[in-house]
Every structure is written in structure tokens, then in C-alpha cells.
Image: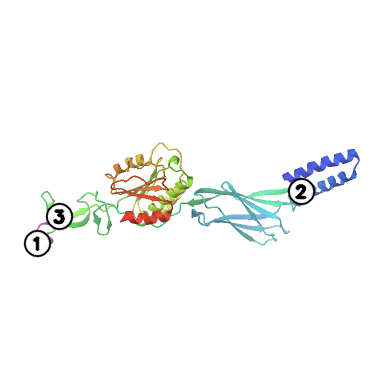
């Protein structure tokens, strides 16, 4: 098919030929003839349909924001003639990537690599892939699509964060929460007998040694949960990059808790996003869910969401510079520890008794402040 330049030259050549013939000038006729010959030659150049096998791969298909990802084209010319002057155009979200192909010899595979943009988080469709063969002057081209649309998942960036401990009672083989009911399954410590204790739990050997009745204290061995609430109200973030940083921070907290085999639940203004039982295998699920999270106009603030969730464990609330945190003190009674994270605040936040306030402008600042909050 003709390009805009090809159509322009064709129309101009016809008009020039007509004007030269009507006025009796030979020069316009010669120029018009040359233009028409160039257009016809361009069409004949691109008319043969190349016989190709094309396969595109995305490696890797899951990356953290800012990490390298690329497309790999495997092209083989199955015809008998050498093909040159071909380019590939691969769509990647709203962007288009132009890839120049080398001359394709018959039955000789060629591999071409190119970078894909990963600066924005999300599920990015890659494709369709279009191979374009054009004449040297750009007057005509032939376009053919190959393959299906594939998806590149750009997930949030993370930094290593230690687990936020919760509660004051600790299992001998791991942490627990002070809200754990007594008298369940796991030995925690020995204490003195008080009236009303079950006599079956008296530790007679220790009682004989100390001269005081000692009772085995049992606690629930279930692990406390890390609850993360992300403010998805777009009005809380003056800059869209602030929300990206909030998601990165949430992913870092969740990955740290999951790596320590603790259950994690993540909520937004729209409701629950993901809930896991704990374990390194859960990190992939968490990152996949956070990859497609978007900020928009939501009816519920982050603190309102936090008030409706099941109590216990640690609570981490993430919001932007314009997010509301002044009423976060009411959450302290429902959770063992509460941390509020503000992204690039415009002014220092209010003092919140019993609540750790972290104000950050990048993930390095989060890592440094998180160490203090854990202590």
C-alpha cells in the first residue's frame, strides 16, 4: 500500500502531467512521468509477499519496576530469495518499539533482541507484532501481523525489611501475639499458681524445686497477622509517582512478612486485595496483585478501612501527603503495633501517641526508618 508520501507524489505527478500536456510544456510531463515510475516501482518492490516464520518471546515476563525486560524475535526466511529492508514494529502498551531486522538469508534463523519499557507498573500488553517491508524511498510498504498479544507484568519494587514484631508473649520457636488465648496448645513459660488455675497444668518438679506451686502457661501458637492498608484515593497523592512509591512500600512490608512465614492481608479503599497464610511462596501472589493496583476516587479513607478489619497483629497504613492520619490513634487499641507511612509529605505529620510515623521520599528512607520502628 502507498504511504502518505507515495500518495502525495502520485497525485502531484498526475496533476503535473495534466498541466504540462494542456499547456504544451515537456518539462512537467517528464517530471510527472518520473514520479509515476517511482510510485509504480515502489509498489512492485513491496508486492512480493515474504515467506517468514516469526516468533516473539518476552524475557522475563515478570519484572520489578525499573528492571530490564526485553523482547526476543526469532525470524526465519523460508523462501528462496534474500529479504532485506524489513523492520518490525512491536506495540508495548501505549508505546511503539521500532526494531530493525538484518538481511534475511534463505533458511537461516536470525535472532533480534530489544528492550521493553518497565518504568510504569502494571500488566502491559505487548503486540501485535507487525513486520513492515518498505521501498528505499518510503513510497510504499507492506505490513503483516505475526503472533498473539502477550503480557508483560511490571510489579512493584521492593527492599528487604525485617518483620514487624507484634505482641509481648513469644513462642519458644517463634513470635506470637499477646491476644492469644491461654490454655490452648503450646507451652510458653512457667509462672506462679493463682487461684482458679487448672490443677492439671501444675509443674510438680519445678514446684518441688522452688517450694512454690508453678503452673505451665500455654498460648496459642498461631502467628500474628500483618495487615497492610493502602490508601487508593487519588486525591491523597499530589503526584502519581507518590502512589507508585506507596505500592512499592506496601510490597516491601508484605514481602518481608511473607519471607518470615507470617500471614499477610492487604486492603484498599475498595476492600480486600489479597490474604495469605504466610510463606515465601506467597510473595509472588502478593506482587502480582499489587502490580495491577490503581489509584482512583474511592468513597472510603484508609483509616476507615482499617477500623473494619479483624483486630490483632501489626497494622501498616500507607497514604500520600494529603491523606488523613490524625485519627489513627484510635487504632492502637485494636492492634499490637500500628505504623503509619506517609509518602513525600508536604509538612511534618502530627504526633500520634503509641504509633510509629514514617515519612519517606524513597525506599532507602523507608528501610532506614523501618529499622527504628521495629526496635
Determine which residue is flagged by label 3: 201
Question: Element under label 1?
Answer: helix
Determine which residue is flagged by label 1: 208
- Comes first in the chain, label 1 or label 3: 3
Q: Residue furthest top?
A: 299
Which quadrant of the figure contains the C terminus? bottom left
Label 1 crowd bin: few (<14), some (14–19), many (20+), radius 10 Å: few
Q: Is residue 235 above or below residue 56?
A: above
- The part of the chain drawn in magenta is 204-216
The color scheme shown is rainbow
Residue 339: x and y, percent?
A: 33, 49
Residue 211 belongs to magenta span: yes
Determine which residue is flagged by label 2: 43
- Which residue is rendered at x = 47% and y = 46% of the image? 292
Tell which of 122 and 27 is nearer to you.
27
- Comes first in the chain, label 1 or label 2: 2
Label 2 crowd bin: few (<14), some (14–19), many (20+), radius 10 Å: many
Asked if residue 138 lies left or right of residue 339, the reply is right
- Which residue is rendered at x = 15% and y = 56% of the image? 191
> Are the two marked residues, 1 and 3, in contact with CB atoms closer than 8 angstroms?
no
Asked if residue 145 lies left or right of residue 8, the reply is left
Residue 209: x and y, percent?
A: 10, 63
Amino acid at each position: 500500500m502507498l504511504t502518505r508520501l507515495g500518495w502525495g507524489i502520485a497525485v502531484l505527478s498526475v496533476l503535473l502531467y495534466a498541466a504540462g500536456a494542456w499547456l504544451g510544456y515537456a518539462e512537467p510531463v517528464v517530471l510527472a512521468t518520473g514520479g509515476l515510475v517511482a510510485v509504480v516501482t515502489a509498489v512492485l518492490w513491496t508486492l512480493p509477499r515474504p515467506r517468514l516464520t516469526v516468533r516473539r518471546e518476552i524475557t522475563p515476563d515478570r519484572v520489578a519496576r525499573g528492571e530490564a525486560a526485553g523482547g526476543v524475535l526469532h525470524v526465519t526466511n523460508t523462501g528462496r530469495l534474500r529479504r532485506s529492508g524489513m523492520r518490525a514494529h512491536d506495540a508495548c502498551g501505549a508505546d511503539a518499539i521500532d526494531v530493525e531486522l538484518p538481511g534475511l538469508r534463505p533458511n537461516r534463523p536470525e535472532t533480534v533482541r530489544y528492550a521493553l519499557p518497565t518504568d510504569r507498573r502494571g500488566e502491559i500488553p505487548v503486540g501485535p507484532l507487525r513486520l513492515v517491508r518498505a521501498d528505499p524511498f518510503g513510497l510504499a510498504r507492506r505490513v503483516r501481523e505475526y503472533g498473539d498479544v502477550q503480557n508483560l507484568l511490571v510489579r512493584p519494587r521492593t527492599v528487604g525489611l525485617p518483620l514487624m514484631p507484634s505482641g509481648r508473649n513469644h513462642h519458644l520457636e517463634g513470635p506470637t501475639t499477646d491476644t492469644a488465648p491461654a490454655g490452648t496448645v503450646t507451652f510458653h513459660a512457667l509462672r506462679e499458681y493463682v487461684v482458679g488455675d487448672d490443677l492439671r497444668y501444675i509443674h510438680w518438679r519445678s514446684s518441688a524445686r522452688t517450694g512454690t506451686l508453678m503452673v505451665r502457661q500455654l498460648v496459642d501458637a498461631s502467628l500474628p497477622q500483618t495487615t497492610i492498608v493502602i490508601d487508593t484515593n487519588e486525591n491523597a497523592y499530589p503526584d502519581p509517582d507518590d502512589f507508585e512509591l506507596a505500592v512499592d512500600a506496601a510490597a516491601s512490608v508484605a514481602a518481608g512478612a511473607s519471607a518470615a512465614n507470617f500471614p499477610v492481608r492487604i486492603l484498599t479503599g475498595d476492600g480486600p486485595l489479597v490474604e495469605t497464610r504466610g510463606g515465601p511462596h506467597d510473595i509472588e501472589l502478593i506482587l502480582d496483585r499489587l502490580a495491577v493496583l490503581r489509584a482512583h476516587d474511592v468513597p472510603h479513607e484508609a483509616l476507615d478501612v482499617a477500623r473494619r478489619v479483624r483486630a490483632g497483629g501489626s497494622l501498616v497504613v500507607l497514604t500520600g501527603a494529603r491523606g488523613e492520619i490524625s485519627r489513627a490513634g484510635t487504632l492502637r487499641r485494636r492492634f499490637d503495633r500500628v505504623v503509619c507511612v506517609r509518602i513525600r509529605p508536604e509538612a511534618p505529620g502530627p504526633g500520634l501517641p503509641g504509633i510509629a510515623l514514617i515519612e519517606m521520599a524513597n525506599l532507602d528512607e523507608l528501610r532506614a526508618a523501618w529499622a527504628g520502628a521495629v526496635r
